[in-house]
Every structure is written in structure tokens, then in C-alpha cells.
Image (cartoon, rainbow, N blue to C red):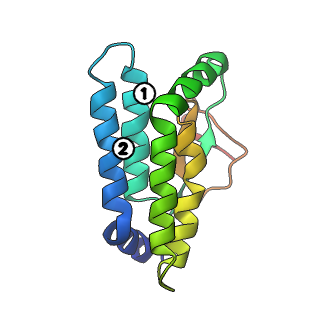
Amino acid sequence: MNAVLNIIWLLLGGIWLALGYFLAGIICCVLIVTIPFGIASFRIGAYALWPFGRKVVDKGGRTYVLSTLGNVIWILVAGIWIALAHVLTAIAQAITIIGVPLAIANLKMIPVSLTPLGKEIVPSTHSFIGYDRHYAGGYLR
């Protein structure tokens, strides 16, 4: 079912949202200081391309203060505009019955579009207690 939803998502707006994220990532990678924003934008662009079957979780760790500061800057520079694009796309998708689940998914992407730093995209098929990238399997159950 996720594959069907992802294909419909891709055709009804996902490609345009992903291209917006990729464009923001390219612009952010121009300066050395904004490369973390560019990497986060590329990561979320890949998520916007194929969102069903994955979810966003907090990374946690010691960089919480830096990611919070970076997220404030991101909100002011690009986050508001990308969140607005999600809202407009959700409105357009909600017009049809087929588009209602897509509109809901689009609205669920707004928090990560506003605060992308300190987040990680993981498969949603696992039940997560936490995510540990140093653990050999990657996931703790």
C-alpha cells in the first residue's frame, strides 16, 4: 500500500516539493557556513519524494543547542516558505477524495520543514524505543 501511495504522492505534488527542497539545498551549499542546512534540505527532499513508509524522529545527542539555533535561522530564512508550500499543496490535494490522505501526509511534513536540524528519517515499519547509529543493527527494540 505504501508503494501505491508513494506513486500517487509523487505524481500529485511530491516531485515539486522535493525539487523545492533540492533547490534550497543547492543554495545553502554555496556557503560553507550553511552546508548543514543544505544537507538537511537534501535529506528532507528525499523524504518529500517518497514519504510513505518512513517517519521523522529526533536524533537527540549533545548538539541540541546548535540544532535549535540552526532551526531558528532556518525558520526565518526558508522554513516559513517551505511550510507555506506544504499548506498550499495540501489544500490542492484535499480537493479530491484520492488526495485526502496525501494532504494529511503533507500537513504532517510541516514540522520537519520548519525545524529540519536534529531530525532523522527512519523506516516506520519498526517500533522504535530509540535510534542508535552506533548499534550494529541501527535500531533498538
How far is the residue under mark 1 from the one under mark 2? 11 Å
Asked if residue 116 is positioned above or below residue 134 in the image, the reply reads: below
In the picture, residue 108 is in which quadrant?
bottom right
Front position in the image: 117 or 125: 117
Q: Image height check: is 137 above or below 11?
A: above
Label 2 SS? helix
Place of residue 140 in the rendered image (x, y in percent of width and height, measured from the top left): 67, 42
Choose top left, top right, bottom left or bottom right for residue 16. bottom left
Q: Which residue is depicted at the point 26% across and 21% down?
A: 30
Q: Nearer the viewer, residue 96 or 7?
A: 96
Q: Nearer the viewer, residue 101 or 57?
A: 101
Structural crowding at the residue carrying mark 2, measured as other residues with C-alpha within 10 Å and reported as few (<14), some (14–19) or many (≥20): many
Residue type marked 1 = Phe
Q: Earlier in the sequence, mark 1 or mark 2?
A: 2
Q: Is residue 53 left or right of residue 57?
A: left
Residue 106 appears left or right of 34: right
Label 1 crowding class (10 Å Cα cut-off): few <14, some 14-19, many 20+?
many
- Horizontal and vertical percent for residue 77? 46, 30
Residue sitting farthest toward the right: 129
Horizontal and vertical percent for residue 56? 58, 47
Residue drawn at x 44%, y 33% is 40
Q: Is residue 77 visible?
A: yes
Q: Which label number is shown at residue 21? A: 2
Q: Amino acid at mark 2?
A: Tyr
- Residue 49: where, in percent of width, then height? 37, 56
Q: Is residue 136 above or below residue 93?
A: above
What residue is rendered at 66% in x and 21% in y? 64
Residue 63 occupies quadrant: top right
Residue 37's mark?
A: 1
Is residue 137 visible to the viewer in this orientation of the structure? no
Secondary element at tag 1: helix
The reply to whether dot 1 and dot 2 touch (C-beta < 8 Å) is no
